[in-house]
Amino acid sequence: MRLSAVHRLTILASLLLASCVQRDSVHRVVVSIADQAMDVYARNQIIGHYLVSTSKFGIGDSRGTYRTPLGRLEIAKKIGAGAPVGAVFKNRKPTGEVLVPDAPGRDPIVTRILWLKGREGQNADAFGRYIYIHGTPEERNIGKPASFGCIRMRSADIIRLFATIGVGAKVEIVPGPLPETTPAIAAGSSNPVGQ
């Protein structure tokens, strides 16, 4: 089948526009392994603070270790826009199942996925290891290491973060604590700063 010149131009324009999605150069995320917490910045102003859960196996980026990588990364893909709270994902696709927080015996990826890509040698395998920031039904474990390498968040929190940051936003995972400028939050709180 032969495409008309107009149809070829339409396809070319669509491909060009799809590759020109503006990258997020405004937002930055800092995750602390020591604090099991995350700060979110817009132009160096803190706009959010969340408790998270990183790997129960420690830090690193070797394949098969289930560790959380350190260093500078970025948001490579956003998956799950519009999915219901608790929507289960398998292989980055919704299964149709929806779980409530702390559903017994279940530990899938839920609600939203922010797929991370490493920007340094020490985290170069992050994308290929499927390291995400994602929702978890195991919300009772937020604030302590419990993941298999990813950064877990409460569903309500990942929805807020997903709506705030875009592809290209910088992510830094640090072994030490977050800066002292972070406001203290009550245990179990998931409110962003100022809300």
Image: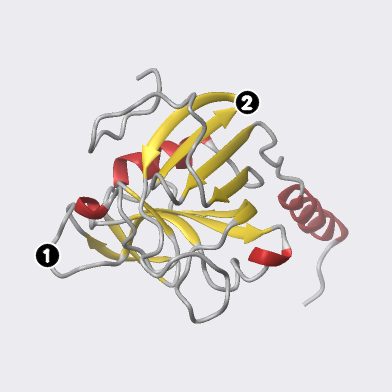
| Residue pictured at 40% horizontal, 57% vertical | 54
Q: Position of residue 56 (x, y in %)?
A: 36, 66
Q: Amino acid at mark 1?
A: Pro
Q: 156 and 119: which one is in front?
A: 119
| Residue pictured at 16% horizontal, 56% vertical | 102
Q: Is residue 166 left or right of residue 161?
A: right
Is disc 1 surrounded by few (<14), some (14 to 19) or many (20+) residues within 10 Å?
A: few
What residue is disc 2 on?
A: 44
Q: Is residue 109 above or below residue 193?
A: below
Q: Is residue 153 left or right of residue 77?
A: left
Q: 90 and 130: which one is in front?
A: 130
Which numbered mark, 2 or 1, is in the foreground of this view?
2
Q: Is residue 71 left or right of residue 159?
A: right
What residue is disc 1 on?
A: 104
Instruction: Give the quadrant of the C terminus.
Output: top left
- Asked which secondary structure carries label 1, the reply is loop
When asked about the image quadrant of residue 12, the answer is bottom right
In three-dimensional space, the C-alpha distance between marks 2 and 1, rounded to whole angstroms, equals 40 Å
| Residue pictured at 48% horizontal, 27% vertical | 180
Q: Amino acid at mark 2?
A: Asn
Image color mode: secondary structure
Q: Position of residue 74 (x, y in %)?
A: 63, 51
Q: 128 and 123: which one is in front?
A: 123
Marked residue nearer the N-terminal end (2 or 1):
2
Instruction: Give the quadrant of the N terminus.
Output: bottom right
Residue furthest to the right? 5
When asked about the image quadrant of residue 57, the answer is bottom left
| Residue pictured at 76% horizontal, 56% vertical | 15
